[in-house]
Amino acid sequence: MIPHVQAQLLAGKKGLIVGIANDQSIAWGCARAFRALGAELAVTYLNDRARPHVEPLARELAAPIVMPLDVAVPGQMEAVFDRIEKDWGKIDFLVHSIAYAPKDTLQGRVVDVPRDGFLTTMEISCWSFIRMAHLAEPLMKNGGTLFTMTYYGSQMVVKNYNVMGVAKAALESAVRYLAAELGPKGIRVHAISPGPLATRAASGIPQFDELLNKAQQTAPARSLVSIDDVGMATAFLAHDAARLITGETLYIDGGYHIID
């Protein structure tokens, strides 16, 4: 659960949360944390099938902007940012918490990945963040923070993570380049790397329960991370106190990534 927060440390900040699918989503943990700290939120849902699951959560957040966003549909990203510009005139932070690989592409060997599956994986999991950064830049008139979600499988070979590890490695590299390019405008960019979480997205990874058990038994904290742990750490980085932290991959995994 989000701890009780007295100070509205992000009051006056406005941000976009992309990737809420249900109340188990990492994006939901981030949204709850940002809202608890006083930020105003815009929320997107993937499609009409997802809408009934996301709209009640958006109401809980008192989100004034709730829109569809499938990054594979031309024009939908632009429509979201156009609405933000029209209603708010600015944006202070963005949380990009989406990734996708076709099932046959994800579950096969990297060496066998088909071209179309690879391109789809990279477009949705990596390029969409770059594009959102491009659209957010002119709205971050007084600086801001861009976040995306990654995983340890970008740096080490994790069984069954396969082509998603390749996509996340590209995403982390993009974070560094974006941080360098946008830093002079006061825009910070981070990759957030949680330990394994039982989200809907993770359900597509074979033998995921084994990965959870290994993480809990091996991590120095001997504990699995929660979506609220991820949310509060992410929200901290959006605060002005973190203004000189950028280009980082922040591990929120109980220390799992330091263990051989």
Image: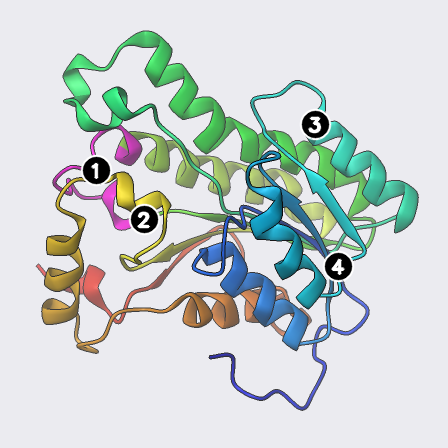
As drawn, which residue projects farthest toward the top? 115
Q: Which residue is painted at 71% across and 73% down in the image? A: 10
Tell me whether circle 1 and circle 2 mark residues in contact (CB < 8 Å): yes
Specify start and end residues of the magenta stretch as a single range.
151-165
Residue behind mark 2:
151
Crowd around label 2: few <14 · some 14–19 · many ≥20 (10 Å):
many
Residue behind mark 1:
161
- C-alpha distance separating marks 1 and 4: 34 Å
Q: Which residue is painted at 75% across and 59% down in the image? A: 63
Q: Percent position (x, y) of residue 137? A: 73, 40
Total residue callouts = 4
Kindly indicate the quadrant of the structure image that contains residue 40.
bottom right
- C-alpha distance separating marks 3 and 2: 26 Å
Mark earlier in primary sequence (1, 2): 2
Q: What residue type is labelled 4?
A: Ala
Any mark on residue 63, and which? 4
- C-alpha distance separating marks 4 and 2: 28 Å
Q: Which residue is painted at 12% across and 45% down in the image? A: 207
Crowd around label 3: few <14 · some 14–19 · many ≥20 (10 Å):
some
Please tell me which residue lies in front, 96 or 65: 65
- C-alpha distance separating marks 3 and 4: 19 Å
Q: Is residue 64 above or below residue 201?
A: below
Report if residue 216 lies within the magenta region.
no
Crowd around label 1: few <14 · some 14–19 · many ≥20 (10 Å):
many
- C-alpha distance separating marks 1 and 2: 10 Å
Tell me whether circle 4 and circle 2 mark residues in contact (CB < 8 Å): no
Say if residue 187 shows up in the picture. no
Q: What residue type is labelled 1?
A: Tyr
Q: Which residue is painted at 30% across and 57% down in the image? A: 198
